[in-house]
Amino acid sequence: MTFSTASSVMYDAVYVPGGEQSVAALRRVPLAVDSVREAYVHCKALALSADANTLLDAAGVRDLEAPPSKGLDATRGVVRSAKVETKGFGQLFTESIARRHWEREAPPPA
């Protein structure tokens, strides 16, 4: 299955590798952007490396701080790296997959 044949709710996590041309192509595909947004909204683990961080903006995810300029960040179950290959990225993503990230769940309307 891919983002074009199944909803992100069918997956435990979403990983988007970096690569300027690949990410630019994904940003033009509404189903790819929706997959990232849905995974975030459903509190699933996400991992984005380098250029892929821009997909969060395209998906409307606005409640995270800017991606790291170097190193790693794993805030709220979203693992982000400044470079395509960063030591410890896989380990953080594995740990993130091990649980749901309910801290991202929107509070009920008042």
Image: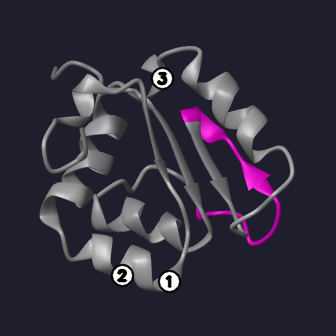
Could you classify mark 2 by the number of other residues whose Cα lies within 10 Å: few (under 14), some (14-19), or many (20 or more)? some
Residue most extreme to the right: 87
In this figure, which residue is indicated by the disc labeled 3?
103
Q: Does residue 23 lie above or below 48 as drawn?
A: below
Three-letter code for the amino acid on which mark 2 is drawn: Ala
Where is residue 83 drawn, in percent x and y? 73, 69
In this figure, which residue is indicated by the disc labeled 2?
24
Any magenta on residue 73?
yes
Say what secondary structure mark 3 lies in.
helix
Q: Which residues are magenta?
A: 66-77
> Dots 3 and 1: beta carbons under 8 Å?
no
Residue most extreme to the front: 1
Q: Does residue 2 lie above or below 16 as drawn?
A: above
Q: Does residue 34 lie above or below 97 as drawn?
A: below
Q: Give the number of the mark in front: 3 or 1.
A: 1
Where is residue 40 drawn, in percent x and y? 36, 38
Q: Earlier in the sequence, mark 3 or mark 1?
A: 1
> Dots 2 and 1: beta carbons under 8 Å?
yes
Q: Quadrant of residue 32?
A: bottom left
- Residue 20's label in the rendered image is 1
Three-letter code for the amino acid on which mark 1 is drawn: Glu
Q: Give the number of the mark in front: 2 or 3.
A: 2
Where is residue 73 drawn, in percent x and y? 71, 49
Where is residue 22 drawn, in percent x and y? 41, 76
Of 18 and 2, nearer the camera is 2
Three-letter code for the amino acid on which mark 3 is drawn: Glu
